[in-house]
Amino acid sequence: MTATEARTDWETVIGLEVHCELRTETKLFCGCRNSFGEEPNTNICPVCLGLPGSLPVLNRAAVEYAMRIGIALHCHVQASQFHRKNYFYPDMPKDYQISQYDVPINADGWLELPGGPRVGIVRAHMEEDTGKTTHLGGGGRIHDASHSLVDYNRSGVPLVEIVSAPDMRSADEARAYVDELRAILVATGATDGKMEEGSLRVDANVSVRRRGEQAFGTRCEIKNMNSLRSLGRAIDYEAHRQIALISDGGVVAQETRHWDEDAGRTGSMRSKEEAYDYRYFPEPDLVPVDPSAEWIASVAGSLPRLPAERRAAIAAASGMAADSDAVVTVVRLGLDDLVDAAASSPGAASVAVRRVANEVASDPEAADRLDRRAFARLVAMEAGGELTAAQARTVLKTLMDTGGDPAAIAAELGFEAMDTGDLEQVVDEVIAASPEEWDRFCGGEDKLQGLFIGAIKKATDGKADLKAASGLLRARRG
Ligand code: ADP
Ligand code: MG
Ligand code: ZN
């Protein structure tokens, strides 16, 4: 089977389960600090160690963050109940996880990918995190480890698990979904969204079916992807594995699979367990959570503008498309304020979007340091034709590295705005050098403008303001 056959004859179906750690001060059911990267086993107490006689007390701030997430995802926020999900693992000292089961706090929502389909959100429920196990002596997995260490600092950290409908059809869509979901979650203030610190953890359910078929195929759940890149690679690998298997007359077994980043493939981990295996039962030590209509309304009222609305605002200010890569990048990185600071006119706004998406985005730390007013002055210089795009990029680099005044940096670099008189002279020289092409241009052959612009650029070492130059060409043509 060729890659093209796989693409044209088969369709990949993907549903994602995303675990999101909430940024509360303390854990979900005790007063221990919720903090990443501390000395192991220092933020622990009888409750999060599951010692006999300890009782959970629900953290109100965590419920509020969960509601913020639900509302931002257009979910129905409802009365919910905690359940015990029973299984053994050394990093879970109670031998059960407190989670939500048949009545999650948020249900039936959706989010819309920029320029793409709407993805259904089945539920977004609350649960506690487990501790963290590190397997030593071997490849980091339990099978070949000589011993394991357990850190309970993470035990009891509040999580919201967001379960999507199986609405995605490619690895690219799955990545775009995580990007958009992360931007929404960060905007609500519920999480820092750091995949590399485990604040966002993605499991992918993948199945395949022949194009045109209505029924879904059997799915596998893939775990252990810790970047968007590995998510995409894992989905592509898994879809190909399933297509090859079915094409050979085989059957996909429903199972949980592990993504091996170094080998670039998924491997079987365990056969899929069903809900009844966990012997879910209502948590007897916690009352149901039933947020009042007033509480829900006040949380909804306190939400900031969300990514889709922010993209629309930048599009309106700049005349660019809301789903263009540059606008999507600005909002995904939360750099709207830079654009806002510089958007004195539609022209300036679109210059600002391009500079932020192309230059500032590649250096997030410099983006934080970058003085908003200095950036706005630089954008005004480029939009007003005092600097060419190439010159503006060079000045911006210095601005991001060392700060300073853009006009002073430009002067120091010798980027003086070309005198209008000088530019007119260059334009005339360039026209005189190609009389035949000029006649054709005047006769309506518009594409020849590029030839003259190129010559002007060359004659001025790139210092000419090309917008002004094309204005002069049009004026001379009459
Ligand atoms: P479980 O509770 O066993 O994990 P769910 O029905 O809650 O099962 O589904 C879990 C995830 O799997 C959801 O994100 C859902 O969209 C996805 N999913 C369900 N069926 C399929 C399928 N056939 N192909 C791909 N993903 C699927
Ligand atoms: Mg599941
Ligand atoms: Zn504790």
Image (cartoon, helix red, strand yellow):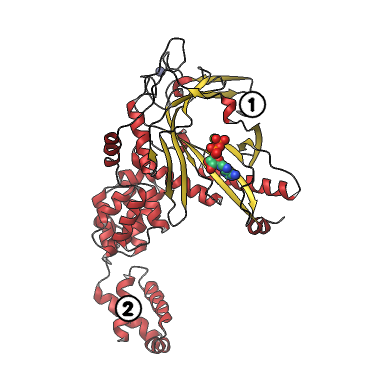
Q: Nearer the viewer, residue 470 or 134?
A: 134
Q: On the image, which quarter does residue 339 sit in?
A: bottom left
Circle 2: element type:
helix
Q: Nearer the viewer, residue 55 or 323?
A: 55
User: Which residue is the site of mark 2?
Assistant: 426
Which disc is residue 130 wearing?
none
Describe residue 471's horizontal placement relative to residue 328 as left or right: left
Cβ of disc 2 within 8 Å of ligand 1?
no
Q: What residue is at 30 percent from the left and 84 percent from the top?
A: 476
Query: Few, some or many C-alpha atoms within 10 Å of disc 1 (few <14, some 14-19, many ≥20)?
Result: few
- Residue 225 appears anywhere in the view: no
Residue 406: horizontal and vertical position, in percent? 26, 55
User: Which residue is the site of mark 1?
Assistant: 138
Looking at this rendering, what residue extends furthest in the right direction? 249
Q: Amino acid at mark 1?
A: Gly
- The answer to whether mark 1 and mark 2 are in CB contact below 8 A is no
Quarter in which the C terminus is drawn: bottom left
Describe residue 215's horizontal placement relative to residue 354 as left or right: right
Residue 340: horizontal and vertical position, in percent? 27, 53
Q: Nearer the viewer, mark 1 or mark 2?
A: 1
Describe residue 398's horizontal placement relative to residue 226 as left or right: left
**Which of marks 2 and 1 precedes in the sequence?**
1
Circle 1: element type:
loop
Residue 117: horizontal and vertical position, in percent? 47, 54
Q: Amino acid at mark 2?
A: Val
